[in-house]
Amino acid sequence: MADISAKVLVVGGGPGGYVAAIRGGQLGLDVVLVEQGGPEGGLGGTCLNVGCIPSKALIHAADAFERAVEQAKSAPFGVRVERPTLDFVRTIEWKDSIVGRLTGGVATLLKRHKVKILQGHAEMLDGKTCRVETDTGPQTVRAEHVVLATGSESTAVPALPFGDRVFSSTGALSLSAVPERLVVVGAGYIGLELGTAFAKLGAKVSVVEVADRILPAYDAELVQPVARRLRKLGVEVLTGARAIGLSEAGDALRIEQAGAAARDIAVDRILVAVGRRARVAGLGLERLDLTMAGAFVQIDERCATSMRNVWAVGDLTGEPMLAHRAMAQGAMVAEVIAGHRRAFDRTVVPAVCFTDPEIVTVGLSPDEARRGGQEVHIGTFPFRANGRALTLGAEDGFVRVTARTDNHLILGIAAVGAGVSELAGEFGLALEMGARLEDINGTIHAHPTLGEALHEASLRALGEALHV
């Protein structure tokens, strides 16, 4: 087969890679995109295929089923449902149909912007040359610029190799039935999102976390409502605990906790969700002159690596491993290659945890601001005083604003509550635009909405609260 030449080669078709390719096409660049596919991939990457999108579909289905069960028990809103049942096979089919629509849409957009797509395994030969093993034979691509966007993969626990009984989040999203007893190893956002969903679907769920509390990446104040909800759902949470392997019979997980003897937890399935690592193996990256930051590729504020005209975006470059960060980096890199002056500012990267209730953080927490030498005003407004939250039957949680004491510049906004993921855009925009407390207070927020809680939290930070 003839060699292919291009202005830009993008290795990886996940959020960072396909956005870089589409934006490059919009800017008139000649782009080739290589995507291997596999159990955690395909166009759209982990996010669209086995991550963000399918997990949120499952979470929504679980919420709907739990509401139906509650309405059958007590009809809290006066709506009575008789004996709801779950057709889990249909749930998975619905989830898969959403994935199919979105990944098909990505392929259409790439073609519309004249991006050439190669399906196959990519291996870099040098900083400008890549060999792609396709179904029809090897293909060599030579490019002036290379964008590495190979993403990440689930981290395994050595004592719990993946198999029929033990799986990653990918396996959890393709189960044919809800397990009767599920143990989740890892109480980060992936483990708790899926663990909560399966608890609502009827599984008996236990969570094992080596840290001393759940969601250790979030500050404790935000986590408290989530912990309360887990207790209400009957989820057993074991913190300060370590999974050490399966029992001899294979039907129990053996754990150790400080100050206690090892014990077994009866289990049908085990979800290992202890984190993700950069996908670098077998890509030929060792042939490139790349400076590494631990296990990740080191980049500067333009996503440039240590090798000229080799760029890296997304999970390959480390935390935060978020699809929207990868997208922003991908679009920016395409613009840099096209000659635009761009730089990536990681200050305003919203983080959303789709637990129940949801958590959103943007910018700094109060403790982070203080550690940075800032004196801060803090305003917190509870959803129990928000009319819209009460009409939704979801009053647990709050919005918190952190601002500088001297000039009231907003440094961070956080929230925990039902549906607060939809406030992430407003929170991010406030920080991106350099808003001060007075800017939020001078913005009329529609009533009744959850967004009013941001207005009230800002008022409270200035000692001017109206509704609490």
Image (cartoon, helix red, strand yellow):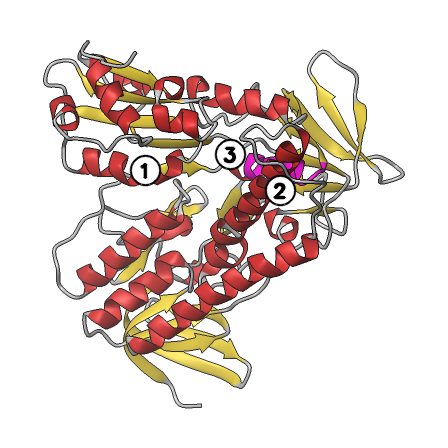
Name the amino acid, label 3: Thr
Q: Report if residue 374 is visible in the image.
A: no
The answer to whether residue 21 is left or right of residue 38 is: left
* x and y percentages locating residue 71 in the rendered image: 62, 34
Main SS type for the magenta part?
helix
Task: Tell me the mark number nearer the camera, choosing from 1 and 2.
Answer: 2
Q: Which residue is mark 3?
A: 355
Considering every residue shown, the one lying at the far right of the view is: 249
* x and y percentages locating residue 385 in the rendered image: 36, 17
SS state under label 2: helix
Q: Which residue is mark 1?
A: 424
Give the CA separation, mark 1 to mark 3: 15 Å
Considering every residue shown, the one lying at the far top of the view is: 463
SS state under label 1: helix
Q: Residue at x 81, y 27 (%)?
A: 264
Point out the stretch of residues depicted in magenta: 191-203
Q: Which mark is residue 65?
A: 2
- Say whether disc 1 or disc 2 marks the residue closer to the N-terminus: 2
Give the CA separation, mark 2 to mark 3: 16 Å
Residue 267: name its quadrant.
Answer: top right
